Structure formats: structure tokens, C-alpha cells
Amino acid sequence: MKPEIRILGIDDAPFDKFKGGKTKLIGAFFRGGRLLDGILSTEITVDGNDATDKIISMVKKSKFYTQIRAILLNGIAVGGFNVIDIKKLNQKTKIPVIIVIRNNPDVKRIKEILIKLRKKSKIRYLENAGKIYKSGAIYTQFAGTSKKKAEEILKISTIHAHVPEPLRVAHLIASGVTYGESRGKS
Amino acid sequence: MKPEIRILGIDDAPFDKFKGGKTKLIGAFFRGGRLLDGILSTEITVDGNDATDKIISMVKKSKFYTQIRAILLNGIAVGGFNVIDIKKLNQKTKIPVIIVIRNNPDVKRIKEILIKLRKKSKIRYLENAGKIYKSGAIYTQFAGTSKKKAEEILKISTIHAHVPEPLRVAHLIASGVTYGESRGKS
């Protein structure tokens, strides 16, 4: 795998969970882990069900579309409980999708919350995301690639700490644009 | 000078010049030319007179304030004719300010436009910015530093083409967040 492989990292902007409404998604397009080459953005509904389609559309209309070799996500959900169907995202874009999870998620508990919130239909997206693998200090799920290739992509793009650069930078931007100053590490 | 010197690059978001209103400023906080460490943002008035004070306030309230060793600007004006007084910006923040200009500006013509737009008072900001120096492929003006130090800072932070990374990245973000996809190189 080339160290300059093109990777898109996507993270959501902070939002007020009591207000609902819309929040931004930021996509940071990198050559490997070093060079930020472009920024994408779109808007999704907080706790809504539009994240998968909004990401597909953002990616497919981008001038970088044909270059992107992997889409990295910071967890399976954005904007609260707007759960991403990574199987569909992979099928519609033909790009491997890798979820990076920093703490081993309690899937049983997430399912219970979704049932309580009457968002039971989203449980199938959790199932579509497949097995959760431990990979060094983080956990991953993926679609359209293998564990070996996913780990190679994460290795190439991780420069600082445990967060791949495309996700670290997408997070800084989403947070900095919303709050006036970026917070946290990812 | 340390290669990891902390530099803030500031650029404005695109806006509709016929609509006026507000536009965002994005600040990209870098360690040297390589590592993006934080994002700042604020809003200014298109063609207004608040850019200098808004930048001073954005910088001084940032957690990075005491670390920033240079502020880079992409031209002397943001949001159309919101001209920045770099002398005041330097005095209030105690941080050297460097303007990067890609084409030798026709200062006489800019002054004529400001007079036509009844923004004559801003001419003094142009004068406060001091002499315009040619520096390799670009032009610079600065406050609170020397030509030698300014050139060293630009050299450390320029990795791709002629645009220092903090400005290249601030531009990508400002443009990508506004349009849904970044455009141009800076």
C-alpha cells in the first residue's frame, strides 16, 4: 500500500442535543497521514436518519471521489443517534469504510437505548457494521475491506497518538468552526 | 528558530459581495509547517471595519495565545474591504504579524478604490502595514519583526508550493466549510 494513499476522515460538529436541528459533518481529505488536500462538508439532522445518504452524496459529488481509497469514521453514529449504515456507504461509493472506536462499545447497551428512543430500525445498521476488532489501542469495524488492509490504512494514517490524522483534523475543524476554538483531541 | 515554532494562519471564508452580511475567519494553529494543532474561528462584517478587533479578540482568548510566535495573513484585507491594521494587531497581541501576498499589489489602485467606496479612513491601515518586500515568489509586509525573521518563519512553514501551510490549510477549511468542498490552492 502506498504511503500517499488518499483517505477521507469524517467527523461531526458539536451540537446541542436538547435543541435538535442540524449539525455539520466535516470531511478531511488526506494524502496518507501527512498532507491535507481538501475539505468537504455537509449537514445532517441531529438524531435523524440521513447521515448515510448525506455522506454518500458528499463523497460522490466530490472532485476527490475517484481518488479516495478509504473512508474513516469516528464511531458509527454522528449527530447523536444518526447511525451510519457502513455496508450501504461502502456499496454505494465502492470505497472501503473503516470505523475507528476509541473505547470498546457496549453494543447491547446501545441497542437498548435505540429501542427506548423508538429507533429500533437502526439496530440493523449496527449489525451491518459487522464484528468489532481490537486493533492496538483502538477498536475497529469495517466494510468492503479486510482486517489486514484496514489495519494497514490506520497504520499509514496515524502519526500522533492513536487517532488517524484525517479523523484528528476533521474533529479539530468541526469543533473549531462551531465553538470558535477546537477542543479535545478527537 | 525552532522548526516547531507555533504559527497561526488566518484566512476568510468566501462570501457573496452583493449580499454583505457576515463571513467567517478561520485560524489554523500549526507547529511549524507540519502539525495542525488547533482551529480558531470568528465572524467579521463583509466590507466592515471590525477585522482587526475580531482577530485580536480571537487570538487573545485562545488557549494557544501564549504559544503563538507569528500570525500570518493572506493579504491585508478580509471579507472584501475589511482592512486589517497589522500595526495595531501586533501591538495588542505582542505577536509578529506577517502578510503574505501572492501578486505584487497595486497600492495606488487600492487607495483609489477605498476613496471611491468612502472608506478613506482605511488608507492609514495600508500605510501602517509598511513597505512591501519581495521574498522569493511572494511579497510580504510585516509588523513587530524583521525581514530576516519574517522570511525565516515563511521558510519553516512553507512545505507545498509557495503558500505557508497555516495559510493553505486555513483557506481549505474556510472554503470547504462554506461551499461543501474546498476550492483552489489559496
Image: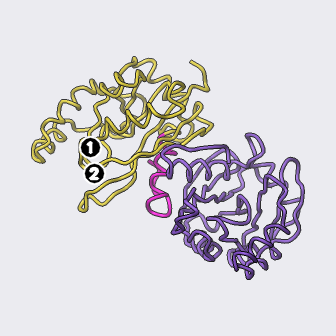
Chain colours: A yellow, B purple
As rendered, which of B145 and B137 lies closer to the eye?
A: B137
Is A18 on the left or on the right of B177, as rendered?
left
Tell which of B125 and B70 is nearer to you: B125
Q: Which amino acid does the dot numbered 2 rest on? A: Val
Which disc, if any, is residue A183? none
Residue drawn at (81%, 53%) of the image: B103
Q: Which residue, given by chain and number where applicable, does mark 1 sit on? A: A82
Query: In this image, B42 relative to B32: left or right?
Result: left
Relative image position of residue A184 (x, y in whole percent): 45, 54
Q: Which residue is mark 2?
A: A46
What residue is shown at x 70% (from left), y 78% (from top)?
B119
Q: Say what secondary structure mark 1 lies in.
A: strand
Q: Secondary structure at mark 2?
A: loop
Q: Amino acid at mark 1?
A: Asn
Is the N terminus of chain A in the top left, top right, bottom left or bottom right quadrant? top right
Query: Vertical placement of B58 versus A153: above or below?
Result: below
Contact, CB < 8 Å: mark 2 with mark 1? yes
Query: Which residue sits at x=37%, y=19%?
Result: A144
Q: Which residues are magenta?
A: A167-186
Count of marks placed on residues: 2
Give the x, y percent position of residue B14.
57, 56
Q: Earlier in the sequence, mark 2 or mark 1?
A: 2
Marks 2/1 same chain: yes
CA neighbours of label 1 inside 10 A, class few (<14), some (14 to 19), many (20+): many
